[in-house]
Structure formats: C-alpha cells, structure tokens
Amino acid sequence: MGIEVKNLNAWYGDLHAIKDINLSIPKNQVTALIGPSGCGKSTFLRCLNRMHEVIEGTKVTGEILVDGENIYGTNVDPVTVRYRIGMVFQKPNPFPTMSIFDNVAAGLKLNGMRNKKQIREIVERSLEAAGLWDEVSDRLDKNAMGLSGGQQQRLCIARTLAVNPEIVLMDEPTSALDPISTHKIEELVHSLKENYTIVIVTHNMQQAARVSDNTAFFLNGEVIEYNTTKHIFSNPSDQRTEDYITGRFG
Amino acid sequence: MANQSLSARKAKNVTMISLTVIGTLLALIPLFSIFAYVLTRGLPAINIDFFTQLPKPLGEEGGGMVNAIAGSIIVVGISGLIGIPVGIMSGIFLSEYGRNRFGRSISFLTDVLLGVPSIVVGIFVYVLLVLAMGGFSAYAGGIALSILMIPAVTRTTEEMLKLIPSHIREAGLALGLPKWRVTLFIVLPSALRGIVTGVMLAIARVMGETAPLLFTAFGNRYWHASLNDPIATLPVQIFTYAISPYKEWQAQAWAGALTLIVIVLIFNILARVITYRKNH
C-alpha cells in the first residue's frame, strides 16, 4: 500500500519544521529521504506513523493517506497507526531488561498474544527475515544488550517486523554502525521491499543511491525535489539538489 | 620544565586521591563504631527469651521484646502496603504524565513533604486520626509512617524512571503499544533495580522512626489485642527502656537496637539479591 501525503505541516513549538509537503510514496519500494541536518527529513518520517506528536509541544496539520485512509483522521487511534507502520530508530534501542527472544516477542506479547507456539514461530521468522537468526539461535534467552551494535539494530528490525507492519520507517538506521553491519542492513532493506513499503532517512548519499528506488531531497522543511533515485543522482532538475549530492553544501 | 610540571601534577593527583580516601574513611568510622558498639552492648542481652518472651514486669529477671519486634514488622508492613503503591504510582505519574505545571508543583510539594520533621507527621496523625478513632492503634502508626514513606518512594521512582532514555519509550510506542503498557511492561522493569533500592531505603528509614510512633502506635507491654489497639514497636520500646533507670532494661534496649539494625540490614541484602537476580 502506498502513502499519500497532502499539505503536511509540522511544528516544534513555534518552529515550523515541515512546510506544506505533498508526496506520494509507492508501495513495495524503498523511498529515501535525504538532506542536510535539520532539514526536516526525520520529522517528516516521524509524522508518517504519528510519532512526532509523542514529543511535547508539537503540532501536525494536513493529511496522510495510507490505503486511502487518513491516519490523522479524527477517529483514528495513533496506537493502531503505529501498529501498522513500524519504525527503526537511529540508535539501536533494544529493551534493556529483556532477552533476545522477548525483545522480538514484545510487540506480540504486550499486545495480548498468548499462543506460545505461534509466538515462537513469528520470532524465528522475524529473526530470519532480519538476517540474525543464525547468529543468535543458540542464545535466544540471553540479554539483548550483549549483542554488538549491528546485531542490536537487526534485532530492532526483527522486533519491528514481528508485529507484521505494512510499512517500515527507518531513521538513519546505520549511522551508528560499522561498514560491515551497514552493508548487512542495506542488503536487508533490499530484500524487505518485497513484502514491505520502506521509507528510509539517510545522511549517506551512497546509501540512498544503493538501496532506494525513489529519493526525496529535503531542505529547510520543504521537498525540493522528488523523483526516482536514478534521476536524482544522475540528472537532478534543481540546482540545490545537485549542489547537495555533489557535496557542495550540507 | 616539562618534567617538573609532570611531577607537580602527579603530586597533586596523589594528594587529591588521598583526600578522597581519607574522606571515605572518616565517613566509615561512625558507621563501624556504631555497629561495633551496639554489637558489644547488645549481644550479651540477646538470648532465645529476647525473641520469644514478652517484657517481664519490673523487678523480674529476663523477658524479651517479641511483641515489639512483631509490632514493628506489622506497623512497617501497614505503612508499606499504603506507602509503596501510592509512592510508586505518583512517581510514575510525575515522570510519565506530569511534565507540566501541575506535575512540577506536585514534585515540589513532594520535596517539601520529604523535609517535614517526622514528629510533625506524628502530631498530625494524632490530631486527625488518633483523636478521631478514639485511641492509639497500629493503623495510626502505619499511616504516620506511610506519610514519611510516600515522598521518598515517589521521588526515587520519579528519578529512576526519568533516567530511562526516551528512545526506549519510543521503541515501545512504535510497536503499536499503548502508552500504559509501555510504561508498565517496558519502562518500569528497566528502572526496577533503582526503584526497589529506593523502596528498601524508605522501609529502612521508617523502621527506625520513633517520634511519630509515640503519638500513634504508642506502645504496649503486652500483645496488641487488635490492629485497632496500641501496639509495641522496637524503636519506642528501645526509647522507653533506654531512658529507664534500670540496668536490666538498658541492656535490653541495646539488644533491641542491635535487632533493629540487623532487620534493616536483612532488608537491604534482600533487595540486593532480588535485583541482582533480575539483572543477571
């Protein structure tokens, strides 16, 4: 299912962080959001699953249609929205008191799933999808904080996949990781788009070029250019986009 | 020149480290001397009778403090039943929902309550409860102690929860979990170790409170008839015996003091064991 963003505005207090964005994100593709620090790309991403409003003093206006339904509609529960639209954060953030198994199972157990066999199957499937199963299958009961940073991040991806979202949002998922772990996550993103619609924020231009089908260039809270990744990186229409991707600023 | 400044820096380093070590030793001296002194004075009066017998009438040899030991546990138990849940819940509120004007003023009032002298709490409960209920009681004692306990538990719970980074909460919310489940099953367990320690310290603190109990639980030379009647507690019993002119009673006061310290110690060790298991 695609995402249709209409006239989206977002604020932190008086700071107008997102200015009137209209964007259409296609289903089962990877869409990258690039731009310099503070351009609003992470804020935009957090608007997509209503995480922006978790921070105090924030405000959002406009519409985001997922499967034709406005997730900012008056009768929509943000909890349900987040259940359908998962999120992977910049810093790996496993639940510190839980085992590897419980981390992946958290979204299921805490949402009331009781069937142990079913939970086990989903945990195994999610860890496999996140490419972590082989590394942790013999120590599922160990604390998740004992994993390396890259493993923790893949665990967080497995945790997100376990609740079976339709869309996965990733906020600079590799910025805290070494090159090998980064490579693994990028491969993972590539394989995940078969089943999920993925939106990824990245500071790394090469990463955007490698993993994404479409790219949106953000600047000062606006989308300057949005097109296929190929087009953006080979033949940008806007001078500012070209300046940014060739490293002249940002 | 370079060497000189290096040696000067090393000397400074050694001096400062020595100062911190001396400071630590100074802090430990009273702790160990209290324990050693109470041990030497209290141990001779400790025997089976002390833990199994009621106080003997004046002039008779022997007797014990079993009613006061049990009484202390009962009164502190009542205070814990009230103080721990109320304190933890207000701590959760202040940390997770109270980041606004209302929350901040409650937080400030909690600090004020934390600083109220315990004897004031005793008089307060005496006027409000003991007079109204028509007499001293275990309930009144427990309630007085819980008033001392609540701000301490609230404060540590709040502080411990605030230490949990917001990205842990966001991870939970992003899984489509309602905030209350995130708070209860993810944030609270992450802070459990600190909260349990805070609760134990609060229990240890009220365990030794004497002043508020003088006005509320009062004391009893016999077994309490019910929780609605005056009840003996260790600190009050120690107080009564220690100021008495009788050698026998004074010795028993020391034994009581030793018992009190050991009970508090056991609580602390228990807390360590519980939280250690949880985390390993």
Image (cartoon, grey):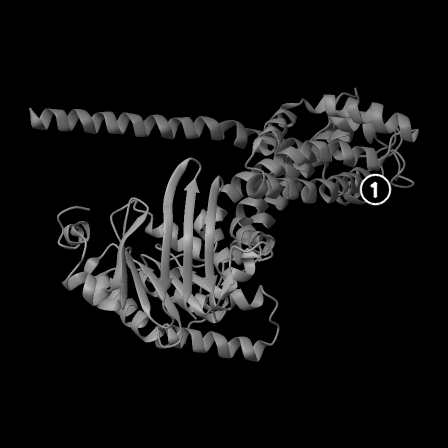
Q: As rendered, which of A196 and A64 lies closer to the eye?
A: A64
Residue A18: image x %, image y %?
A: 37, 46
Question: Does residue A185 appear left or right of residue B243 in this picture?
Answer: left
Which quarter of the rendering shows the N terminus of chain B? top left
Q: Chain of mark 1?
A: B
Q: Residue, x 71% and y 32% (percent of image)? A: B147
Residue A159: image x %, image y %?
A: 45, 66
Question: Does residue B244 appear left or right of residue B158 in this picture?
Answer: right
Name which quarter of the figure residue A90 lies in: bottom left
- Tell me which amino acid carries mark 1: Gln
Q: Residue, x 39% and y 66% (percent of image)? A: A157
Given the current orientation, which residue lies at the most extreme left position?
B1
Q: Which element is circle 1 on?
A: loop
Name which quarter of the figure residue A27 lies in: bottom left
Q: As rendered, which of A222 and B225 lies closer to the eye?
A: A222
Name which quarter of the figure residue A113 lies in: bottom right
Q: As rendered, which of B111 and B11 lies closer to the eye?
A: B111
Looking at the image, is A11 positioned above or below residue B30? below
Q: As rendered, which of A176 and B152 lies closer to the eye?
A: A176
Residue B2: image x %, image y %?
A: 8, 27
Residue A28: image x %, image y %?
A: 37, 73
Q: Residue, x 31% and y 48% (percent of image)? A: A222
Which residue is tagged 1?
B53
Looking at the image, is B237 positioned above or below residue A215? above
